[in-house]
Amino acid sequence: MSTNWKIKLSLYINYFVFAILLNSVGIVIAKSINVYGVDEKAASILEAFKDLPIAIVSFFVASFLPRLGYKRAMLIALAVVFVGCLGMRFGNSFWSAKMMFLSVGVSFALIKLSVYSLVGVVTDGPRQHSALMSSVEGFFMVGIASAYFLFPAFYSEADTHAWLNVYLLLCGFVLLSFLFLTLSKVQIPAPTAGANWKEDIKSSFSLIAIPLVLVFICSAFFFVMIEQGIMTWLPRFNEKIFSFSEKLSVQMASLLAISLAVGRFVAGWLSKKISWAVIVIGCALLSIALLLAILPQLKVAATITRLVSISDVPVLGFMLPLIGLFIAPIYPLLNSTVLSHLPKNLHSPMSGLIIIFSALGGTLGSRIVGILFGEVGGVKAFYVLLIPMVLLIVSVLVIQRIIRRKSQSVAAASANIAA
């Protein structure tokens, strides 16, 4: 549908910008500590300001969104995040950072819910739908990696506040997306009445009574604790432990985003040949092995000399971000497994639970690492992530056992009917 190129371009820009903003929390935490003088414990609250609004808004607005209209919801989201970015640029404070991430969380919930619906409107047939969805999600991964290069590009030794100018550029992207979306002539079907939000809540939480869902929720919770604990605090970890300059710390953290993207691509190929449980457990064990191999060799840098060039980075500095290769396949495989073993009518409420507990896991993981970072140091804080890794393996084994029992029960029932 060539007439819809404006709205398609808006979708690309939206996901690109929000990927940058969502995954800049580790960068802003480091800046909050260095520029605004807050400690690690206080700075870790930024993750909650980002993640909890995503969970809350997604859960309560999903049924109301059809009444509001998807295009209108996206325009509102873009306006909110535009104000949030301007507030960060000119507010220049830790409080401004909190409000900015609050606006990002609220807006992204509206954007994500709307994008998934609009893709079906601007495409014809399953192949076009799959192609556009894949490319939009691809832009999200590009945005994640771009954040680690875009922010350092605005760093200045002479002006500690120059980095805030990145938000003016992001405002420009948001404004461009707003204009493309406003000028698009896409015909969106008239919104129909959504389900009652109380019924949505009831149907979602009733799923917890299903053993498979309950254990899956725990495993998703543990995974996001691991992922966000590492991703959020890696820039600060690089700065304190490896003695990288602030700019180099962020740039080296980009290796984690790149390894996450590569890991998910490889997992898609491996999942066609190897059992999902084998991949997930194997990846978790490799992640544990990598941390146990690297962390004992690290300690807080004693030298005041900062490393500023990639050529100065030690081997361990390159090895730690490679954990992304091993944790990347876990989350999509867990989601695919549990959804494929539930009736299709339960996929929507299940998605609500995934969003909620993923957000809670990310917030808690970042908060715990942040508190421990200030109390016992970065190395010991990262050791704590071994606990959810072990619990994740246990959860996967339980999920596999539940699925096997379910399959055996179905097979036995079929045999009885045949007899």
Image (cartoon, helix red, strand yellow):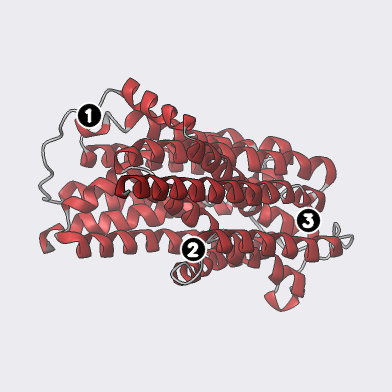
Residue 178 horizontal side relative to residue 99, left or right? left
Instruction: Kindly give the residue lying farthest to the bottom in the view shown.
Output: 311
Mark 2 nearby-residue class (10 Å; few <14, some 14–19, many ≥20):
many
Q: Which mark is residue 146?
A: 2
Query: What distance separates the C-alpha of mark 1 from that of mark 3?
Result: 50 Å
Query: What amino acid does circle 1 point to?
Result: Gly
* Residue nearest the observer in this picture, 350 or 127: 350
Instruction: Kindly give the residue lying farthest to the front in the view shown.
Output: 419
Q: Earlier in the sequence, mark 1 or mark 3?
A: 1
Judging from the image, what secondary structure is the residue with disc 3 in? helix
* Residue nearest the observer in this picture, 51 or 129: 129
Q: Which mark is residue 240?
A: 3
Quadrant hosting residue 130: bottom left
Does the residue at mark 1 contact the one at mark 2 (Cβ under 8 Å)? no
Taking the spot 70% from the left edge, 74% from the top edge, the residue there is 309
Mark 3 nearby-residue class (10 Å; few <14, some 14–19, many ≥20):
many
Residue 122 horizontal side relative to residue 307, left or right? left
Q: Residue 278 appears at what percent x and percent y?
A: 58, 63
* Residue nearest the observer in this picture, 415 or 101: 415
Residue receiving disc 1:
194
Q: Residue 93 appears at what percent x and percent y?
A: 59, 37
